[in-house]
Amino acid sequence: MRRRFLHRKIMLQPLRDRILVEPDPTRDDITAAGIIVKAREGIHTSDEQLGKKGTVVALGAEVDRDQLKAGDRILFGEFNYPEYFEGARRYLVLQDKDVCAVLE
């Protein structure tokens, strides 16, 4: 398995069990009939909770590094997470328990 590591310096260090994630951009989806459906940024009910993907950028000291490392591609629940912007890049601060899976 090949891992892609990030080499840019981030000015935010997560604490305790938090992780810093660069989410994949929200995209439009196309139905089977070819209709483009605009993806929504937030959710309103648990029925709409589909999950999102992103890349782990930094880890707090209490995160289990046997399960999660910087550069891992992850799937996480769609909730309102604290956001951090550095230039044009957007980052989210999650707890390690918000991670559903590591993508291979």
Image (cartoon, grey):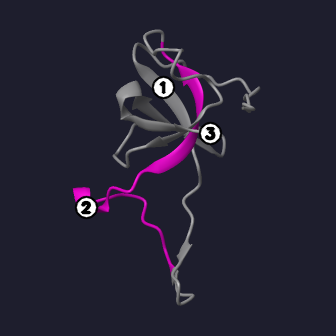
Secondary structure under tag 1 reads strand
Secondary structure under tag 3 reads loop
Which-is-in-front pick, marks 3 and 2? 3
Label disc, if present, on residue 19 of the rendered structure: 1
Comes first in the chain, label 3 or label 1: 1
Q: Which residue is tagged 2?
A: 47
**Separation of residues labelled 3 and 2 (CA atoms):** 26 Å
Q: Which residue is tagged 3?
A: 104
Q: Is residue 51 magenta?
A: yes
Which-is-in-front pick, marks 1 and 2? 2
Comes first in the chain, label 1 or label 2: 1
Q: In this view, does 80 lie to the left or right of 9?
A: left
Q: Which of 2 and 56 is in front in this view?
A: 2
Which-is-in-front pick, marks 3 and 1? 3
**Separation of residues labelled 1 and 2 (CA atoms):** 25 Å
Q: Magenta span covers which residues? A: 37-60
Q: Does the magenta stretch include residue 55?
A: yes
Q: Is there CB contact under 8 Å for labels 3 and 1?
A: no
Image location of residue 71, percent across then percent down? 65, 30
Secondary structure under tag 2 reads helix
Residue at the image point whose x is 33% and y is 56% from the top: 49
